[in-house]
Amino acid sequence: MAGSGILSPMKIVRKITPNKLAGRPAPRWIPQAMLGKMPEAGQSLGKVGPLEVRLSNGAKELKMSQRLRFDVFYKEMSAIADAQTQLTRLDRDSYDDICDHMLVVDHNSQVRNKPFSKLKPQIVGTYRLLRQELAELNGGFYTASEFDIQRILDRHSDLNFMELGRSCVLKPYRTKKTVELLWHGIWSYVLMHNVDVMIGCASIEGTDPDLLAQQLSFLHHFASAPEEWQVAALPDQYVDMNRIAKDKVDQRAALRSLPPLIKGYLRLGAFIGDGAVIDHQFGTTDVLIIMPVSKLNSRYINYYGQDASRYAS
């Protein structure tokens, strides 16, 4: 706000992570070279050294990504496993079968899925992608269980939505290189499927909103979606994010304390929905991420390449 001394979230991010951002939104376009090139199972979407980003290839790799998610969500973090999850040691649900699964694999780390099986590159990161046409054929988006996203689906019925979810990376690989590869793969996928809007739940660890007051209030005051993109948490799950007055929020401290994934979304130009949701199973407080492709930060688009060529294999 001009003259108020309060910095916008994008200015705060720029000051903390210099040379990462630019202010101009990107125009909506799809390069002609990308049209009609649909990604296939197992198709490589980029490489950096021994690391490769690609789509999963069949049931075995899906199971390996579910095991990775179990290790991160249930063993490292505070998710509570039901009996079936504990028995299988897999994080899975009914959405897995209708989603594409973006993987980062390390060709220098070979593992066996089962004893005496063939060595395969280790899966070290994963993202779950659900396109609107598949969601509508199978009961809708996972996000609709927490947020009233039908409001923006109806308002922007001419646009093509995609849901991002179940993002996780093994701890030793939580580096800039791995995250960049994942986003390079997602950008390639967005172009190939002509996606207009990305949505999804992003999590802050912890289930006491009062202990998360700085983060939630920061997102509410400085990253809230404009009216045309506004969506609220479902009434029976709604948690007010406006817990600290705008002029009392320590913006730098709040931003630093946010999970890297949410900070990354803000750098890209994401909006935040109205209200949070407590996910007791995963031990998190969820916020809604809304990323219209037309509003993505132009510097990031230029960085990965207008045709997703930066890390092309």
Image: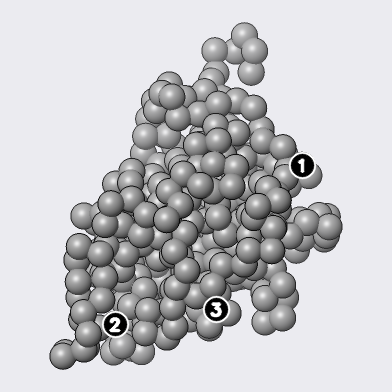
Which circle, 1 or 3, is nearer the viewer?
3
Q: Quadrant of residue 219?
A: top right
Q: Quadrant of the N terminus?
A: top right
Give amino acid for label 2: Arg
| Residue, disc 2 | 89
- From the viewer's perspective, tell me whether residue 31 is left or right of residue 223: right
Residue 95 marker = 3
- Foreground: 290 or 242? 290
- Foreground: 78 or 70? 70
Residue 63: x and y in percent read 37, 82
Compared to 277, does 140 lie above or below? below
Q: Residue at x 16, y 90 (%)?
A: 115
Q: Residue at x 45, y 30 (%)?
A: 20
The secondary structure type at the circle numbered 2 is loop
| Residue, disc 1 | 227
- From the viewer's perspective, tell me whether residue 212 is left or right of residue 98: left
Residue 288: x and y in percent read 58, 53
Q: For residue 220, say whether it is visible.
A: no
